[in-house]
Image: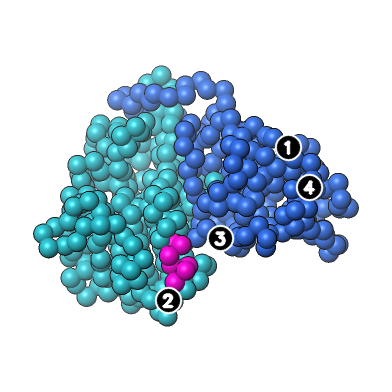
Amino acid sequence: MGIISSGFQGRRNRDDPGLPPGQHRAEDFPVLSAGPTPRIARADWEFRIVTETGTSRHWDWAAFLALPQEDITADIHCVTSWSKLGTHWRGVALDTLFDQIETTARFSLVHSYGGYTTNVPLADLLGGKAWIVHQFNGADLPSEHGGPARLLVPHLYFWKSAKWVRGLELTGEEIPGFWETNGYHAHGDPWREERYG
Amino acid sequence: MSSAWHIVDVVAVQEETATARTIGLRFPLPVRSLPGQHLDLRLTAPDGYQAVRSYSVASASPPDTLEITVEELPDGEVSPYLVRKLAVGDQLEVRGPVGGWFVWRPEDASPVQLIAGGSGVVPLMAMVRAHDQARHPAPFRLLYSVRDPESVYYRQELESLAGSSSGLAVDYVYTRRAPAGRPVGRLDARILASSVFGPEADPAVFICGATGFVETVSGWLVDSGYPPERIKTERYGGMGGTG
């Protein structure tokens, strides 16, 4: 593009290979939510996967913690242009949860406590690409960051990593979620700058 | 819809406070915008380095010109350039306006409660202005928490609107220093309850500010019986996403 701002230097992250195009590095952890933070007690929490045939499986907090736990280090990229590199999380891989699921669905609609939804293809959830996480930097995930548990899909823009996650609805057709029906991209790959729909 | 970058002309700059400036951007064509949306703005340095930031739109009139108000962040990369160096006659690349959630839609007849923390007033001012320009019958109320009198954005315009028959009422909370005779102190649940439409009025609520402010105020409202689905929030930085 031809518009050069001659007085603008910029100062950070030049040629930083961890940053997708149009992103800058955030040292803090900004909180972005569309509404009030839901407060969910772990005693009331459950996570449920409902398949395209209507069968479902769910885990309460104890059953969820009894599953194999993984430590994940990942870069996260928010569509508002901040990225946070090398974040540390702990949780359960979607692969582990799907070991107990029979499905041929290609898409999922992720549901959260509080009503938030986002759509993610199964191809982006499986194969070591996504987790349900409950710890951040070694501590319980704070509610403003999605606790008790949130989805973590670090290779997509962070609005896909739904906070306060409560379940997945598996579907044959892609059903747009909350931001995806409010002007944002259906897929959200930061390396391809899939920001807006 | 809005993923293309446009080249816009800087047609006006105006100081709002010692650290904030309103910038008028003229588009090549009229732009459709909803009050509450934001723009992405891209700067390119002479060596090709680019930086992108999101800024809320403050005003959308006349229809080919949008205004943003930018607060200079002490450690900012982009905002010091916009507040200190950018001049009328410069050009910028912008994308948008974007966002379909944190917006006021005039077809909604509900009373509207706006709650601003500091520079979070910017997208709410777009709603106030759209409400006034439409001579919209819905009652509007703005609660504006700010450090001191000198930090108030759009002061004269807000005073004028609040004193007119526009249907806008404005309450200020001064957290560090107040005009003579006015209390100083942070917003608390009691002041909040006395400064906003009650839950029985079923207002559409928009809150914008720093994270702690938005978290605290939205929590008080939910505890007081406002339905969470009637409360829309935006933290500094554009899209009220789920990052």
Q: What hue represents chain A?
A: blue
Q: Find disc 1 in the rendering and name its residue.
A: A70
Q: Are marks 2 and 1 on the same chain?
A: no
Please state if B156 lies on the left or on the right of B138 as rendered: left
Q: Position of residue B23 (x, y in %)?
A: 28, 44
Q: CA distance from mark 3 to mark 2?
A: 19 Å
Q: Find disc 3 in the rendering and name its residue.
A: A38
Q: Nearer the viewer, mark 4 or mark 2?
A: 4
* B46, A66: nearer the viewer: A66
- The chain holding disc 4 is A
Residue that appears at 82% across and 48% down? A98
Q: CA distance from mark 1 to mark 3?
A: 26 Å
Q: Quadrant of residue B53?
A: top left
- The chain holding disc 2 is B
Residue that appears at 42% across and 80% down? B200
Q: Considering the numbered disc 2 on the image, is that residue within a helix, a strand or a loop?
A: helix
Q: Find disc 2 in the rendering and name its residue.
A: B199
